[in-house]
Image (cartoon, rainbow, N blue to C red):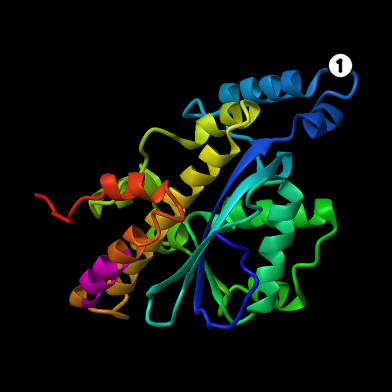
Amino acid sequence: MGEILSIKDASAYLVLDTESVPDGRLLGKVKYPQENLTPEEAVSRAQAEAREHSRTGSDFLPPSFQFPVAVCVIRVAADLTLQRITSLGTPDFRPRDIVEQFWLGVSKMPKTKLVTFNGRRFDLPLLELAAFRYRVTCGASYFDQSRTRFNTNHLDLFDWLSNSGACWLTGGLDALSKILGKPGKMDVAGDQVYAMWREGKTREINDYCVFDTLDTYFVFLRTRVMAGAISGKQEEELVERAREWLAGKTGEVPALQKYLDNWGAWEPWP
């Protein structure tokens, strides 16, 4: 999957997802400057403190103390068909390369709408702060549009489905994907990414990111039915076309076969 640089075929949407890991060095400098902790020790201490203060026992740390190790982008045409899936930073997945490629792509497509799941709270702040870290230009048009309350260049499906946070979508993307018959979480979840990264499993992390981004795309399609932009029949056709398109890419991206093997039908209950 190549870099997201070409604008030969216009895209209307960029569906994206990120995976990130805690920055132990920064945590040590900011939270524990007098304790001479290793980066691993600083992460462990911060995660323990997060669990202690979390209602759910989560050890998740704010985006200001994380950096991206995977970003997947799906280019989607105005008719909502898949155009391209890109894992940024291939094959080495260096964070700086990932960040530079993402913002270069966004700057080259200023009229393209970003689509995320919970991206307003996490993915985009993560990428913006990474641009700050690496001195990367995001583009004036991005900030002109993203810093306005209305007519923004970003559709956060979590916000859209939760009425801007009025209700909490317990189960999140995983639950919504499984309602649609899509895989959702399989054998990897977000809380495993840090351990995988420490083991050097960057390819596996990026495959997982691809799966989440595909789930986000299919949730996006269903929201377009809800909004009246497409009919249920059109959604069926788009889903089938996507399945065929993905099947044709398994030679190039072997991990897609796993996604297809766990693909199911939309069979609403009760």
Q: Residue 230, percent across and down?
A: 28, 79
User: Is residue 147 visible in this depiction of the protein?
Assistant: no
What residue sits 33% from the left and 73% below the top? 224
Dominant secondary structure of the residues highlighted in magenta in the image: helix
What residue sits 86% from the left and 30% below the top? 29
Q: What is the residue that sits farthest to the front in this orientation?
A: 251
Q: Residue 217, percent across and down?
A: 40, 62
Q: Magenta includes 237?
A: yes
Amino acid type for the residue under numbered disc 1: Glu
- Name the quadrant containing residue 34: top right
**Left or right, residue 248 beside residue 231:** right
- Name the quadrant containing residue 231: bottom left
User: Is residue 238 visible in this depiction of the protein?
Assistant: yes
Of the pair 92 and 31, the residue shown nearer to us: 92
Q: How many marks?
A: 1
Residue denoted by label 1: 35
What residue sits 56% from the left and 80% below the top? 151
Locate the N terminus and report the quarter of the image it occupies.
Answer: bottom right
**Left or right, residue 161 beside residue 130:** left
When the figure is inspected, residue 143 is found, relative to residue 35, above or below; the finding is below
Secondary structure beneath disc 1? loop
- Magenta segment, which residues? 234-242
What residue sits 60% from the left and 73% below the top? 149
Q: What is the residue that sits farthest to the right in this orientation?
A: 34
Q: Magenta includes 21?
A: no
Q: Residue 8, percent across and down?
A: 58, 83
When the figure is inspected, residue 27 is found, relative to residue 130, above or below; the finding is above
Q: Residues within 10 Å of mark 1 (few under 14, many from 20)?
A: few
Q: Residue 175, percent across and down?
A: 31, 45
Q: What is the residue that sits farthest to the left in this orientation?
A: 270
